[in-house]
Image (cartoon, rainbow, N blue to C red):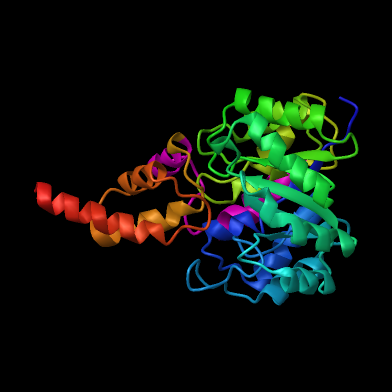
């Protein structure tokens, strides 16, 4: 393959979920330097749920949004620093401030059937001259043809790149191929296509490679897979596979391995791995960031966290509805008492 794949590193954004948004500025600085030195093209540095996400609902971050972004910008010599914004959590003013602090990539994320809420944010990012990305989360929750229609909306608003986002780690390779290929065949040829994977079904690397084979221009990855649920596509694993397949990219395998092993893994409070809870996320198709919330609620109310996630899937929860988890846990606890 002659095209060079762009790697967007999400260690400092999706990885926030796995550490309860508690990265310190010192950790952010060290991770940024290591990711930058390994050759990543873009480093995303934001609260896990995007700009404005630090709150009582999602949990408060250790550092301010300004310090997170400015620290990444100060320590990235080559990579562009990006931010994520979910309309309704983040607003236009957040985006303008992020730009003032040095962010040059803006990813505007919506649920896979709600691209219309991204219009003003995508237009503002483009107006600011940022590398503007549409990010269609939970892409498994709608048919590929419907997802394409949502992507076309983002295209019309001015997005330069549009992502198939497997937020739940629920897509199989066929599902990934169908979505990415439809984007490549039907969007303007100038539009780049990206893929963001989670490893809940152990398919993070496989889906990323499938996306590349269908023409994806950008792939998300994180050191040691640091991210919500079972984590994201692990950069070190992805780079090893891409090198074996002679897929062109800018990353250095050994540097990526060393950063994952020596720097990222010691920072993990909870091992990012496929276990019964993260596997349940992928199997039921639940948003990956729900894992720690369900785990805590299960312990507090004495119910199986897998039952919480399964019930959450049944009632159709999407990203941003973590507050449902407590209610579901309470319901399950009552049912458990009645059946005792």
Q: Residue at x 61, y 27 (%)?
A: 175
Q: Where is residue 160 in the image (x, y as percent from the top left)?
A: 85, 47
Q: Which residue is drawn at 67% across and 56% down?
A: 117
- Is residue 222 visible in the rendered image? The answer is no
The verdict on residue 274 being magenta is yes
Q: Where is residue 302 in the image (x, y as percent from the top left)?
A: 23, 56
Magenta span: chief secondary structure:
helix
Residue that protrudes farthest toward the left in the picture:
340
Relative height, residue 322 to residue 225 (above, below): below
The verdict on residue 101 being magenta is no
Which of the two residues, 14 or 185, is positioned nearer the viewer here? 185
Q: Which residue is drawn at 80% across and 60% down?
A: 81
Relative to 276, 98 lies left or right = right
Q: What stretch is highlighted in magenta?
A: 253-282
Q: Which residue is drawn at 29% across and 56% down?
A: 329
Relative to 291, 194 lies left or right = right
Relative height, residue 290 to residue 88 (above, below): above
Relative to 255, 61 lies left or right = left
Q: Where is residue 169 in the image (x, y as percent from the top left)?
A: 55, 39
Which quadrant of the view contains residue 6?
top right
Which quadrant of the view contains residue 25?
bottom right
Which of the two residues, 337 or 247, is positioned nearer the viewer here? 337
- Is residue 134 visible in the rendered image? The answer is yes
Relative to 248, 286 lies left or right = left
Q: Where is residue 123 in the image (x, y as percent from the top left)?
A: 82, 59
């Amino acid at each position: 393959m002659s095209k060079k794949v762009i790697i967007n590193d999400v260690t400092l954004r999706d990885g926030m979920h796995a550490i309860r948004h508690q990265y310190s500025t010192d950790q952010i600085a060290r991770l940024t330097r290591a990711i930058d030195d390994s050759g990543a093209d873009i480093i995303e540095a934001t609260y896990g749920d995007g700009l404005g996400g630090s709150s009582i609902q999602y949990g408060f971050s250790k550092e301010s949004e300004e310090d997170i972004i400015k620290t990444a910008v100060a320590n990235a010599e080559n990579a562009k620093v990006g931010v994520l914004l979910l309309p309704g959590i983040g607003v236009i003013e957040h985006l303008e401030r992020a730009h003032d602090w040095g962010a040059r990539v803006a990813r505007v994320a919506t649920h896979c059937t709600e691209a219309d809420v991204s219009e003003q944010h995508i237009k503002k990012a483009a107006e600011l001259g940022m590398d503007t990305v549409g990010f269609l989360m939970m892409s498994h929750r709608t048919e590929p043809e419907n997802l394409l229609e949502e992507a076309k909306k983002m295209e019309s608003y001015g997005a330069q790149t549009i992502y198939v986002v497997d937020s739940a780690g629920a897509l199989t390779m066929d599902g990934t191929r169908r979505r990415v290929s439809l984007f490549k065949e039907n969007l303007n040829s100038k539009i780049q296509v990206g893929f963001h994977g989670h490893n809940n079904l152990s398919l993070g690397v496989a889906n990323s490679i499938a996306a590349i084979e269908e023409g994806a221009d950008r792939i998300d990855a994180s050191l040691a897979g640091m991210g919500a649920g079972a984590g994201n596509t692990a950069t070190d694993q992805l780079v090893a596979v891409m090198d074996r397949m002679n897929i062109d990219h800018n990353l250095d395998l050994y540097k990526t391995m060393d950063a994952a092993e020596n720097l990222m893994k010691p920072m993990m409070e909870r091992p990012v791995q496929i276990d019964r809870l993260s596997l349940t996320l992928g199997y039921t198709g639940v948003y990956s960031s729900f894992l720690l919330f369900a785990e805590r609620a299960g312990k507090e109310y004495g119910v199986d966290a897998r039952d919480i996630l399964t019930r959450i899937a049944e009632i159709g929860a999407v990203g941003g509805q973590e507050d449902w988890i407590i209610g579901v846990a309470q319901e399950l606890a009552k049912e458990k008492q009645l059946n005792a």
